[in-house]
Image (cartoon, rainbow, N blue to C red):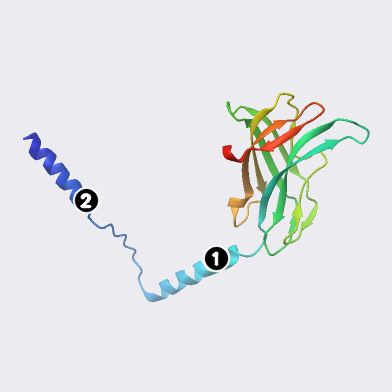
């Protein structure tokens, strides 16, 4: 009896595996097909135009006061306008850093530093105390992640996450991007 039940279940799965899946869509007439194609074409044309902010890379730099000897280690962004029209207004970025092993939050940054416009093909690196600040004396491994807004037609390039070995405090701060852990 158990043999027949097992054989029946196997046969049922075999039939289901080779049953074609057909998804039917009701279209009342040919005119609606043409209007759907026109709408799809207009959406794709609009998405290829306009501004497209892209994060190119994370840029570390040392910020020093005018008369100070020691600097602070900051990690900021290199942002590029990949679109075909200038970006005017305020561009915001949000950054977070957390410890690699425990994923505990270490620091965050935000900014609305671009005042003016970013022309097509132009890059911008916000500095003057912008970006994530690292003050740790013992070298540690950090996740560093940034997001740029406003989001555009290509949101995949508005976010970046990298792993760094960072020593931010003291006389000799250093950083090293560890691409194997990304």
Residue 38 at x, y percent in the picture: 50, 72
Per the image, the residue denoted by label 1 is: 44
Badge nearest the viewer, 2 or 1: 2
Seen from the viewer's position, the closer of residues 91 and 170 is 170
Q: Residue at x 75, y 33 (%)?
A: 174
Residue 41 at x, y percent in the picture: 52, 69
Residue 182 at x, y percent in the picture: 58, 40
**Residue 129 in the image: above or below residue 20:** above
Residue 182 in view of the camera: no
Secondary structure type for disc 2: helix
Distance CA(mark 2)–CA(mark 1): 38 Å
Query: Pointer 1: residues within 10 angstroms few (<14), some, or many (20+)?
Result: few
Per the image, the residue denoted by label 2 is: 16
Q: Earlier in the sequence, mark 2 or mark 1?
A: 2
Secondary structure type for disc 1: helix
Q: Are marks 2 and 1 in contact (CB under 8 Å)?
A: no
């Amino acid at each position: 009896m158990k043999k027949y039940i097992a054989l029946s279940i196997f046969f049922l799965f075999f039939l289901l595996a080779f049953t074609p899946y057909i998804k039917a869509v009701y279209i009342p007439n040919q005119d609606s097909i043409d209007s759907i194609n026109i709408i799809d074409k207009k959406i794709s044309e609009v998405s290829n135009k306009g501004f497209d902010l892209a994060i190119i890379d994370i840029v570390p730099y040392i910020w020093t006061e005018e008369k100070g000897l020691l600097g602070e280690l900051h990690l900021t962004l290199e942002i590029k306008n990949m679109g075909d029209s200038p970006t005017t207004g305020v561009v915001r970025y949000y950054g977070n850093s957390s410890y690699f092993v425990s994923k505990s939050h270490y620091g965050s940054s935000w900014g609305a530093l671009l005042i003016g416009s970013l022309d097509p093909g132009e890059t911008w690196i916000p500095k003057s105390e912008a970006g994530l600040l690292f003050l740790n004396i013992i070298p540690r491994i950090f996740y560093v992640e940034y997001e740029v807004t406003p989001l555009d037609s290509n949101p995949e390039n508005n976010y970046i996450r990298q792993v760094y070995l960072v020593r931010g405090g003291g006389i000799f701060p250093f950083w090293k991007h560890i691409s194997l852990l990304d």
